[in-house]
Image (spheres, helix red, strand yellow):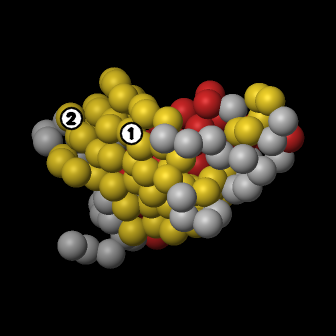
């Protein structure tokens, strides 16, 4: 597969991960290649629910952002393209407690517009915290 061009990486990093919502939660793009990204949710008390347990809503936001970033991590994709999450199934496997969380998102299938992917969220020690299947609609901009 082709390397991710600078324009596509900039869209992923500056538009998706560093969106206003992404900034609110403090997301950080850890790695980015075609069809695969890792996004980190830094631990802080602002994203907890009880004690040091990271809120499920923050984890769901991490999943959605990482999946969106993976779908946009496509060589040659224009910023004029449009996309939206159309569904996801999220399962929590264990509590994320007092540590940064990392969401690894991978595209499983790209159709003409509908894409499917998977996301695994792990804690800093590598233990799985959540897993998700995400469906996304990505409409590429028409040339001209």
Of circles 1 and 2, the one toward us is 1
Report whether 79 appears left or right of 127: left
Percent x, y for residue 97? 72, 47
- In terms of depth relative to the viewer, which is nearer, 62 or 100? 100
Residue placed furthest toward the front: 94
Q: Residue at x 39, y 68 (%)?
A: 33
- In terms of depth relative to the viewer, which is nearer, 30 or 15? 30
As drawn, the label of residue 114 is 2
In the figure, 104 relative to 140: above or below?
below
Camera sees residue 92? yes
Q: Residue at x 20, y 36 (%)?
A: 113
| Location of the N terminus (image quadrant) | bottom left
State how far apart marks 1 and 2 are (Cα).
17 Å
Report whether 97 appears left or right of 75: right
Quarter of the image holding residue 115? top left
Camera sees residue 43? no
Q: Residue at x 24, y 46 (%)?
A: 143
Which residue is the site of mark 1? 132
| Location of the C terminus (image quadrant) | top left
In the figure, 31 relative to 130: above or below?
below
Q: Residues within 10 Å of mark 2 (few under 14, many from 20)?
A: some
- Whichever of labels 1 and 2 marks the residue nearer the N terminus, that label is 2
In the figure, 104 relative to 53: above or below?
below
As drawn, the label of residue 107 is none
Residue placed furthest toward the left: 112
Label 1, secondary structure: give it.
strand
Report whether 9 appears left or right of 113: right
């Amino acid at each position: 597969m082709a390397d991710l061009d600078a324009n596509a990486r900039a869209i992923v990093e500056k538009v998706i991960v560093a969106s206003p919502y992404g900034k609110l939660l403090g997301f950080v793009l850890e790695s980015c290649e075609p069809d695969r990204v890792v996004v980190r949710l830094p631990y802080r008390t602002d994203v907890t629910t009880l004690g040091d347990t990271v809120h499920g809503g923050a984890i769901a936001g991490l999943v959605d952002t990482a999946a969106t970033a993976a779908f946009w991590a496509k060589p040659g994709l224009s910023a004029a393209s449009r996309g939206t999450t159309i569904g996801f199934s999220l399962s929590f496997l264990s509590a994320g407690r007092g540590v940064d969380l990392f969401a690894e998102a991978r595209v499983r299938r790209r159709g003409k517009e509908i894409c499917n992917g998977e996301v695994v969220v792990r804690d800093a020690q590598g233990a799985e915290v959540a897993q998700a299947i995400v469906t996304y609609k990505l409409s590429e901009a028409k040339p001209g």
